[in-house]
Image (spheres, rainbow, N blue to C red):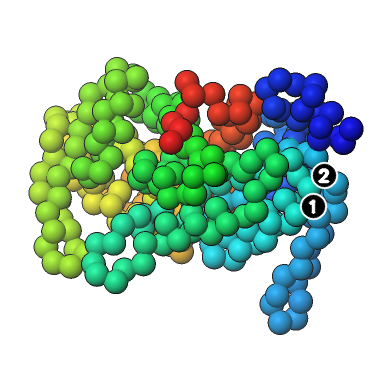
Amino acid sequence: MSALAAALDASDTGRVSAPPVLLSIPSYEPLAARLAAVGRFETGEVERRTFPDGERYQRLACDVRDREVVLLAGTATDADTLLAYDLAHAVVRQGAARLTWVCPYFGYQTMERAARPGEVVAAKTRARLMSAVPRAPLGNQVLLVDLHAAGLPHYFDDDVGAFHLYAKPLALEAARALGGADLVLAAPDAGRAAWVESLAADLGADTAFVSKRRRSGAVTEVARVEADVAGRTVVIYDDMVRSGSTLVEAARAFRARGARAVFAVVTHLVLPGDAVERLRGPGALDGLAGTDTHPRAREVEGPFVTVRSVAPLLAAWLAREGDADAIGRR
């Protein structure tokens, strides 16, 4: 009897009894170390080097045959995406029993539809690329975190189990820490309104909303603030922050209405270039909290930026293997 057959015979749930082998790409090694510290995994090794022409070499330096493999690899950059895809492909070809690709940050997730004729729906093409990894005997899964659009798991092929994990516990924890007992939870635009209502209900907090109008092209301006925030602490929630312009506009609008302090809680801290300096500039935020779903988070962590790890949430999900009470499944 093969090792895989023996493992399946020993468990009527279809789980392989040995702990999963945990692999990652270089940019996600810090998060992988945190995940390994809070979960039951066997850390695998990958040999890597870069050739003079920029091509990259990878070799699995561990045995994954008949094992469950967890690949921790967000697709924050095109290079990371291909590095993870190549490694996932090798994992299955080397005989892994099951592959779970944990993708804390799904790149191009805001490009989920074509707003103009001819636009590339990159979120869909990336999902199809990830779906093209060969199927392991017990199947392939993809775990995604706090997606910009909840329907993105449907972009993956039907034979890939695509799951959406919400980092709501971390958002609630951060909002309480920043805003205290009398906070006002705010949405920077209409797109986050439903999420803010849900979080506010759990916090027992009041809500505030910013309404915008488009001036021209990509230029918008705040039209009105729907809430009484005078003398109170406002905590803005959003799924991600990139340049920071949306959060800065919202913060200034709330300050103009008399807010005592304005903070922001986001899941994905993308923050390229001088975005942090912009966010803590005059009239902007008093502080920012987020998670380590994106590699940039630990680079900008400091007195102004607080980072909480998603490792415990990932470990709990992996231990349950997709308990339907804890996640949204397509």
Classify 33 as above or below 83. above
Counting every numbered tag in the picture gives: 2
- Name the residue at 19% across, 63% down: 219
Classify 171 as above or below 307. above
Question: Circles 2 and 1: CB distance less than 8 Å?
Answer: yes
Which quadrant does the C terminus fall into? top left
- Name the residue at 13% across, 66% down: 216
- Name the residue at 54% across, 65% down: 78
Residue at the bottom extreme of this rendering: 53
In the rendered image, which residue does mark 1 sit on?
94
- Which quadrant of the figure has residue 227? top left
Residue at the right extreme of this rendering: 1
- The three-letter code of the residue at mark 2 reads Arg
- Which quadrant of the figure has residue 153? top left
- The first of marks 2 and 1 along the sequence is 2
Q: Position of residue 149 (x, y in %)?
A: 35, 45
Examine the rendering and report whether any part of residue 140 can be seen.
yes
In the rendered image, which residue does mark 2 sit on?
65
- Name the mark on residue 221: none
